[in-house]
Image (spheres, rainbow, N blue to C red):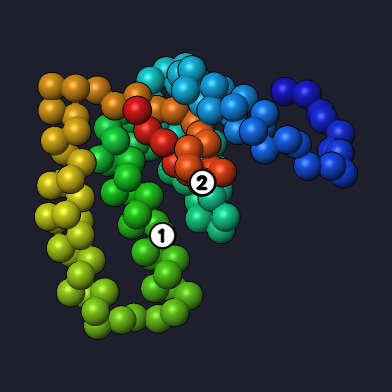
Amino acid sequence: MEYRDMVDRMPDPHEFTTHLAALHQTSKSPNGRFGFHITTYSGNLPQMDRERVGRNWERYFTKSMRCALKLEIDAKGPDPEFDVLVPVLFDKVIPCLLRPLEERRSICEALTCARRSLVCKFWN
């Protein structure tokens, strides 16, 4: 890794997003696992490190979502609606939506890429 001086000007949006999309569409995890080898952050939300979740996208997403919801409850206190909705999310919704994506297929990790909005999460 090298140090880069920051500049005061914004890059050309078309050129920037073209390079960003190319970078992220061709990136590969060096060991095929989701996440980074250390805890990283998306805003104030810690992202799960790959050593704890391995190669399973459903497990990675579930652990990340549990962490985000715990931070929400810690910050705002208990919510009776959460008590009803959260178990359904983890027991039914997430498995129903994500598990079929991995049956007889593999999901490859990619970095963040530019599509429609400037930056969005993108998983192949």
Residue at the spot x=64%, y=33% of the render? Answer: 14
Name which residue type carries label 2. Answer: Ser
Tell me if mark 2 has few (under 14), some (14-19) or many (20+) residues whose alpha carbon lies within 10 angstroms of its own: few
Viewer-nearest of labels 1 and 2? 2
Give how far across and how far down residue 94 sits, in percent: 20, 50
Q: Is residue 37 above or below residue 45?
A: above
- Which quarter of the picture shows residue 80? bottom left
Q: Is residue 47 above or below residue 25?
A: below
Report, in whole angstroms, how far the alpha carbon at label 1 lies from the one at label 2.
23 Å
Name which residue type carries label 1. Answer: Ala
- Residue 122 or residue 107, whichever sits in front: 122
For disc 1, the marked residue is 68
Left or right placement of residue 69 versus residue 37 in this view: left
The quarter of the rendered structure image containing the C terminus is top left
User: What SS does tag 2 mark?
Assistant: strand
Left or right placement of residue 111 versus residue 7 in this view: left
N-terminal of the pair, mark 1 or mark 2, is 1
Q: Which mark is residue 118?
A: none
- Residue 101 or residue 85, whichever sits in front: 101
- Which quarter of the picture shows residue 92? bottom left
Tell me if mark 1 has few (under 14), some (14-19) or many (20+) residues whose alpha carbon lies within 10 angstroms of its own: some
Q: How many marks?
A: 2
User: What SS does tag 1 mark?
Assistant: helix
User: CB of mark 1 within 8 Å of CB of mark 2?
Assistant: no
For disc 2, the marked residue is 117
Residue at the spot x=18%, y=45% of the render? Answer: 97
Left or right placement of residue 82 versus residue 11 in this view: left
Give how far across and how far down residue 52 sits, in percent: 38, 37
Residue 115 seen by the camera? yes
Residue at the spot x=84%, y=38% of the render? Answer: 6
Left or right placement of residue 79 versus residue 19 in this view: left
